[in-house]
Image (cartoon, rainbow, N blue to C red):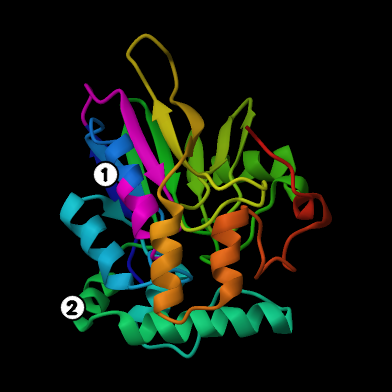
Amino acid sequence: MSEIKTIVLPDECTQIALCGGPYSNFSAVEAFLEATKNIEHRFCLGDIGGFGPCPDRTLDLLRSSQIICLQGNYDRAIAYEERDCGCGYSDPRDRHFAQLSYDYTFAKTSPHHREWLQKLPYLIRLEWREHSLLLCHGSPQQVNEFVWESETEDRQIAQNLRQFQVTGICCTHSGLPWLRRIEEGFWLNVGVLGRPPHEGKRHVYYAIADFPTTIKTPQPRLIPLAYDVETVVSLMEKEGLPVEFRESLQHGIWTTCGEILPEAEKIVRPRV
């Protein structure tokens, strides 16, 4: 596993874009690239493949756009030919669908992309003027840790911020977007581009952090993103992916891999 990668952003940088979990949803990735085309510094927090169709298509998009990516558990598993995605699901039904997704993605990912995935860093530290941000996949300590809003206390966030000496920590693995600001800084789950966040709506999320020279600290915000769902769904059907995957994109709810959700997160609750 790669060591932490440090990137020093130029002093004149006033905005960055962050996405997570593309899950081979090439249409959502295209929409993200278009929405953020005027932002020079863009980052993907891992799990590029899985769930969606034709993983090479999404990998080609991200690599050609020169977005800086870190290595999620899915990326590592594909890169090193592991037996499963290492997602951390415990429910048998969830594990069944996760394995279907992994086996498909593994078979459809080209060797040159697997080699590229091996080289991605596990953590990225952004030095942004007098502040630092830490980008991770699950948590700084564990690549597949599920960090849920309902189960995370402010003191835990503060402890992580102090441990890594940063103003903010950004992650994606649990798939549900949320933002918590505390006195010491913030914790941000940027959401995933690959499927809707169990809100009963089709949109997905990404994040932007603003840091104009007129303010003292970076300010993160979550952005809903609409995209062409039916193009992806049509290709999923053509590729023989489970109907449950397609229904999740169409109806905006988690039809698979949802037993891991805490009771509060299982409620279908629109954010916007």
What residue is disc 1 on?
A: 7
| 129 over 223 or under it: above or below | above
Q: Position of residue 45 (x, y in %)?
A: 41, 54
| 165 on left or right of 272 | left
Q: Residue at x 39, y 42 (%)?
A: 18
Residues 86 and 22: in front is 22
Precedes in sequence: disc 2 or disc 1: 1
Q: Quadrant of the C terminus?
A: top right
Residue range highlighted in magenta: 10-30
* Quadrant of the frame with the N terminus: bottom left
| Between marks 2 and 1 in the image, the one whose residue lies nearer the viewer | 2
Type of residue at label 2?
His
Image-quadrant location for residue 69: bottom left
Q: Is residue 31 visible?
A: yes
Pointer 1 local density, CA inside 10 Å: few below 14, some 14–19, many at least 20:
few
- Residue drawn at x 29%, y 79% is 109
Residue 103 highlighted magenta (yes or no): no
Query: Of the numbered discs in the image, which one, if any, rests on residue 112?
Result: 2
